[in-house]
Amino acid sequence: MAVMNLRGYLRAIRKYWMLVLLLTVLGTLAATGLTLSTDPKYASTVTFFVSSQTSSSQTALQADQFAQRRINSYAGVMVSDRMADLIIKKANLSLTPAEVKSEISATTDVNTVLLTATVIDTSPDRSLAIANAISTELNGVVNGLDNPGSTKTTTFLNAITGPTLNTTPVSPKKTLNIGLGFLVGLALGVSAAIVRELMDVTVRTADVMQTLSKRPVLATVALDAATAKSPVLVRTTVRSPRGEAFRQLRTSLKFIHVDQPLKVVVVSSSVASEGKSLTAANLALVFAEAGQRVLLIEADLRQPRAADYLGLERAVGLSNVLAGELGVDDVLQPWGDSGLTLLASGSIPPNPSELLGSNAMADLMVALRARFDMILVDSPPVLPVTDAVVLSAVADGILMVVHYGRTTRAQFTSAITALDAVDAKLIGTVLNMAPVKDIPSGYGGYRYAEEAKIPAAATKKRTQAAVTTPTPDSVRRRRATEDLPTKTESPTRN
């Protein structure tokens, strides 16, 4: 279970706002329904002034103090069985003494001789009838107890207010009940949202990634509406928040090791379907956009995808070069005039790990370093196979891609542990496919507006170059045709 700070709580509420809203509405509706289904109750009150007769040896003050000391006893008399029987007879009620007593409450004012009786009943008429019976019968009951067997009156309980019926129901309190229902529903909704967030074991924030990996999060790539239609950055998406994220990633990779600039970077992930191939392709495009000679190597020899994203052929490529069937110049494919070149996977071999860890691979990387400014290697995920670990030996570092809300913390931690076990150079991570609402916009609007001023002619030229799918030249096609089938069976896609 994750530990959350204030930002985490706010993020959970925003993420599960529908759940919060639902429980809040349900709480409000439940309170409203309960309130409307409860019978209203009405209150009648009567207030007595309590006094006692003074004797020749007793002053008025002493009589007043006597009444104050006895007044709490009179309040008890008011809710006694004897008083209840008299009320039932006087008001002609069809209630039991216990029911009558449950409707009566007596209160006294401190340091006074005032005694107030309150009767609450679902019937306003019955409430007033009981209050009337109390006002007429209480004085007689009290004197009968003070002077048993005597008709002499020594205590006087005179009704000075009421009996009065309050025509407005005293319960249920609609506003209070509905307000409490709203607050209870809101509290339950917020609690449920926080619990769901705490129970979520997937990676959703850069803070969690940095805590687990002990490496910097170099970029957070947004999942916007254009991703499905145009996964590779072209004219309509190159100035989007997603495009800006890849530029941020490019800048981070350029300056993360100033003394020893990165030239060969392996792009991998913990498990499949985290977007590492698409990340590698788009990162290669933004490096080429900066005027660099960029090579993208499709080194995932099990489930290659990079060539598909760029619309290029993968029938021949890296595996054929490593097997000695073709020269590297025969299989390199430029992507328009963008400055990006693809070395596709080629034929799917039975022993990918052995090929990628061979001396031929090491010699090839040495030769390619001299020809390109930046080389990005799209490798298989770390946990299922060892290919990424093998490739780390010929690279300057590994970049790990994490899918927002899909990659679990356990998977990510296991992948980091596997890389650390062989001293692989993990340079940083990328949080991929994050909702746009979770990414700060910052200066983005200003930047996009300024770059939108690029002349239309230049934009058109770049777009045409980007969407052009070049074919291998005639020599490469002829050599591939002589030695290999012109089309290999399409591998299973991840």
Image (spheres, helix red, strand yellow):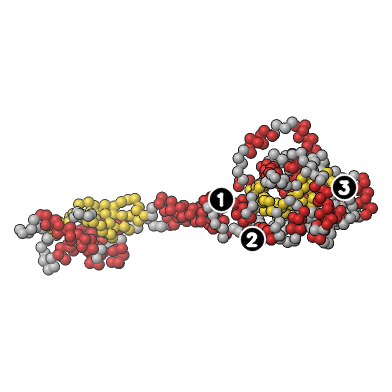
Q: Is residue 231 visible?
A: no
Q: Amino acid at mark 3?
A: Asp
The numbered dot on residue 388 is none
> Mark 1 or 3, which is nearer the eye?
3
Q: Which residue is mark 3?
A: 329
Task: Tell me the element at label 2.
Answer: helix
Q: Nearer the viewer, residue 81 or 136?
A: 81
Upstream in the sequence, badge 1 or badge 2?
1
Mark 1 to mark 3: distance in Å?
Answer: 51 Å
Q: Which residue is mark 2?
A: 410
Mark 1–mark 2 CB contact (< 8 Å):
no
Q: Amino acid at mark 2?
A: Ala
> Mark 2 or 3, which is nearer the eye?
3
The numbered dot on residue 11 is 1
**Where residue 34 sits in the image (x, y, percent)?**
44, 57
Mark 2 to mark 3: distance in Å?
Answer: 42 Å
Above or below, comparing residue 336 to residue 161 in the picture: above
